[in-house]
Image (cartoon, rainbow, N blue to C red):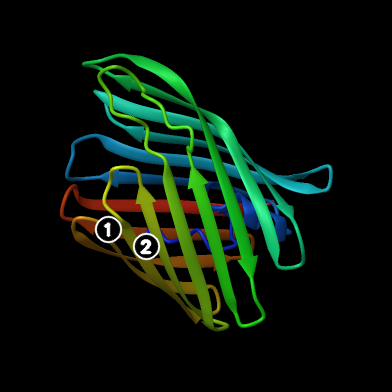
Amino acid sequence: MALGGSGLAQIDAWSGINNPAALAFLDANFLSSSHRQVFGIEALQKSALCGNFKSFGQQVALSLEYFGFEYFNQSKIMLAYGQKLSKSIALGLRLGSEAYYIEAGSSGWVPSVEFFLFGKSASKLQYGLAVKNPFSRKLSQEYRLKPSSFSLGFLYLLKKELHFSFEAESAWKESLRLMSGLEYEISKGLFFRLGSNYSDQLNFSGGAGLQWHKFRLNLSYLQSNAWGSEMCIDLNFQL
C-alpha cells in the first residue's frame, strides 16, 4: 500500500497476488499476511494471506483475500502459477473463485481468472502486464458487472538500495488509475516508502519496513479523499 499499489513489476513475497509470473524468478518460499483498516468507513477491512512454495520444480502460490464489512463483503481464494519462457520473460496464471454477500441483494460466487506477464532487462528495468477477468459477468441482478481490467507496470532500479515503480490500470467503464512508488533502503534492513495513486482524486501513502533475518514487517498509511485514512500492517516470513 505504501507504494501506491504499484506492485505489478516487483519480485517479492506478494508476487503470488500482484503478479504470479514473477514467481518464476522467485527462489525463496514465503508466508505472508496483511491487514488494512479503513477508518473513514466504520468496520471496513481488507485482509490477505498468501503462501508460495515449489511444486514439481515450479513456484505456485495460494492466496485468500477478504474485503468488506457487515452489509457488503467479498472473499477470494486463488491458486497462482508462473512459468519462465526465457531467462528474462515469464507468464503467469491465477485461477479461483470469488464469493460475495450483499445484504440488500443476494449472495453467491463467480469464477475469477487473471493472466500475467513479467519481464526484466539488463538495464535494471522490470515490467509487468495483467489482464483480469476478461470474461466479465454480473454478480447479481442488483450488482454491477465485475469489471475486466488491464494493467501495465514498470520498476526501475535506480541503484541497489533505491527503486521507482509506476503502474497504470484501466477497468471497463471506470476511470484510469495511475499508481507510483519509491522505496529506499536507509540502512541494512530498514526501508522507507512513498507512494501516490490517482483515479478521480489524488491520494498519497507512506510507510516503513524492517527486515530481520527471515522476517520482514511493513507498516503503511494512506490518506484517501474518498474513504479517509487507512492503516496497513503486513508480515512476511521466509520458509
Looking at the picture, does residue 235 appear above or below residue 162?
above
Disc 1 designates what residue?
222
**What is the secondary structure assignment of the residue under circle 2?**
loop
Give the image quarter of residue 75. Answer: top left
Q: Are marks 2 and 1 in contact (CB under 8 Å)?
A: yes
Q: Closest to the observer: 84 or 165?
A: 84
Across and down, in percent, residue 150 comes to 44, 50
Looking at the picture, does residue 149 appear above or below residue 190?
above
Give the image quarter of residue 95. Answer: top right
Across and down, in percent, residue 40 comes to 17, 45
Across and down, in percent, residue 158 comes to 51, 84
What type is the residue that disc 1 sits on?
A: Leu
**Residue at left offset 47%, top offset 60%:** 152
Residue farthest to the right? 56
- N-terminal-most mark, 2 or 1: 2
> If the image is split into quadrants, where does the N terminus sit?
bottom left
**Residue at left offset 36%, top offset 23%:** 139
**Residue at left offset 69%, top offset 63%:** 89
